[in-house]
């Protein structure tokens, strides 16, 4: 008898946790699984299962399409004429001070 009682206790705990999950989740349709008639529960269960299966199929399709995408990589060097730089460049190495800015 203790196995039967613990089994019933487990079933009621799982049912209570499922009802709490369905009423607190923000996804649409799950609240109907916990609070509606049997026909409505069955209809929403079918709708949610179909949506889940469609989502998994769509994800699989997109990932396989991404992984099978053909790409072509081409590297080329542009052998343009070397630019001409000046031989000497003069740079002022003194820092600009506030005093010189006031003049």
Image (cartoon, grey):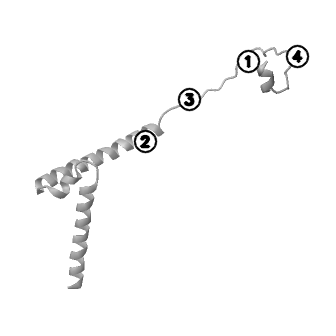
SS at circle 4: loop
Q: Image height check: is 24 above or below 13?
A: above
Q: In the rendered structure, which disc, 3 or 1, sits on the residue that comes first in sequence?
A: 3
Look at mark 2 in the image and give the residue it sits on: 63
Q: In the rendered structure, which disc, 1 or 4, sits on the residue that comes first in sequence?
A: 1
Pick the front one: 63 or 95: 95
Q: Image height check: is 103 above or below 22?
A: above
**Image position of 59 (left or right of 30):** right
Please state, as top left, top right, bottom left or bottom right, where the N terminus lies in the image. bottom left
Instruction: Indicate which label's residue lies in the foreground, 3 or 1.
Output: 1
SS at circle 3: loop
SS at circle 1: loop
* Alpha carbons under labels 2 and 4: distance apart: 56 Å
SS at circle 2: helix
* Alpha carbons under labels 1 and 2: distance apart: 40 Å
How busy is the neighbourhood of tag 4: few (under 14 within 10 Å), some, or many (20 plus)? few
- The label on residue 72 is 3
Q: In the rendered structure, which disc, 2 or 3, sits on the residue that comes first in sequence?
A: 2
- The label on residue 79 is 1
Quadrant of the image occupied by residue 61 = top left
Quadrant of the image occupied by residue 5 = bottom left
Q: In the rendered structure, which disc, 2 or 4, sits on the residue that comes first in sequence?
A: 2
- The label on residue 99 is none
Please state, as top left, top right, bottom left or bottom right, where the C terminus lies in the image. top right
**Image position of 10 (left or right of 102):** left
Query: Total label count?
Result: 4
Instruction: Indicate which label's residue lies in the foreground, 1 or 4.
Output: 4
Please give the name of the residue rendered at 13% of the width and 55% of the height, measured from the top-left corner.
36
């Amino acid at each position: 008898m203790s196995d039967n009682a613990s089994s019933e206790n487990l079933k009621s705990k799982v049912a209570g946790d499922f009802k709490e999950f369905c009423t607190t989740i923000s996804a649409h349709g799950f609240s109907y699984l916990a609070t509606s008639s049997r026909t409505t529960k069955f209809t929403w269960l079918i709708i949610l299962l179909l949506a889940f299966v469609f989502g998994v199929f769509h994800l699989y399709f997109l990932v396989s399409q991404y992984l099978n995408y053909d790409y072509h990589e081409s590297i080329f060097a542009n052998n343009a004429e070397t630019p001409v730089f000046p031989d000497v460049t003069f740079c002022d190495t003194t820092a600009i001070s506030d005093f010189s800015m006031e003049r």
